Amino acid sequence: MIKRFLAAFALGMVLTLIAISFYPFQKAPRFPSSAAVLNNGGREEVFFIRLPDDRLGNPRSATTAAFPRTAFASDGNDRIVAELFRVRDTEGRVIGIASRITGTVAGIRGAAGVTDWILVIPSRGALIMSRGGVPVGEIPELPANRMGLPAPKSGIMMHGTDEFSELAGFYAEKMNIEKVDSAGIVHGELTLTTRLRSTVQ
């Protein structure tokens, strides 16, 4: 069931990206990048998600989308959660959307937690990023130097399109919780810090 769930979710995101590429939508506004130059020659850019307001499908947004979505393995042990968010820049402007899939995968050292992000900014491109996870039957090679980002909370940029296609690097995810209300809804801010450098020699 989990495989079908993940396949359907990933296929939906891929088909959406393909449709955006070919369908003649109105051109999205191009907001200035807030990237800062790093001493090592890379660049840092921070994206923000306000909770619960930027969670797509939350009860307060008056929508019927069933997110966050949870799936379990047939034995009830493995759990996968899929979420959709609006994404903002440092000025607080909504510039794109993001999906986050969290769960566990089997590996030679036992089950490991995995977090996968797909960040889509229509005027600039898409970023696919991943944190954690142990490849089945392989020993993972985790880079020690993640451009200054903390290893336990950081992951790798797996792929980029358009403006991000010739970049490589890492990202870090941080949750700042302000409060949890009586309904159990978390209020706060989720930040995604990317540190990328050009792959062009």
Image (tube, rainbow, N blue to C red):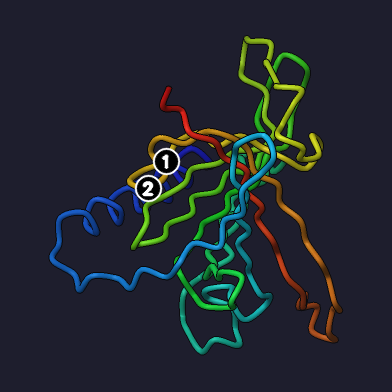
Where is residue 159, by image quadrant?
top left
Up-down relation of residue 22 to residue 170 (above or below): below
- Which residue is painted at 37% across and 56% down in the image? 124
- The spot of residue 36 in percent (x, y) is 61, 54
Residue named by callout 2: 163
Up-down relation of residue 29 to residue 33 (above or below): below
- Which residue is painted at 62% across and 19% down in the image? 135
Up-down relation of residue 29 to residue 5 (above or below): below
Give the quarter of the figure containing the C terminus. top left
- The spot of residue 86 in percent (x, y) is 52, 70
Image disc number at residue 160: 1
Q: Regarding mark 1 in the picture, which secondary structure is present there?
A: strand
Q: Is residue 185 left or right of residue 93?
A: right
Characterize the local packing of mark 1: few (<14), some (14-19) or many (20 or more) Cα atoms within 10 angstroms: some
Disc 1 marks a residue whose amino acid type is Gly
Q: Is residue 80 visible?
A: no
- Which residue is painted at 35% across and 53% down in the image? 12
- The spot of residue 119 in percent (x, y) is 48, 54
Along the line of sight, which residue is nearer the eye, 3 or 51? 51
Q: Are marks 2 and 1 in contact (CB under 8 Å)?
A: yes
Where is residue 76, by image quadrant?
top right
- The spot of residue 77 in percent (x, y) is 72, 40
Characterize the local packing of mark 2: few (<14), some (14-19) or many (20 or more) Cα atoms within 10 angstroms: few
Q: Regarding mark 2 in the picture, which secondary structure is present there?
A: helix
Up-down relation of residue 25 to residue 150 (above or below): below
Q: Is residue 48 left or right of residue 113?
A: left
Q: Is residue 99 visible?
A: yes
- Which residue is painted at 59% across and 65% down in the image? 68
Disc 2 marks a residue whose amino acid type is Glu
What is the C-alpha distance between the residues marked 2 and 1?
A: 8 Å
Image disc number at residue 97: none
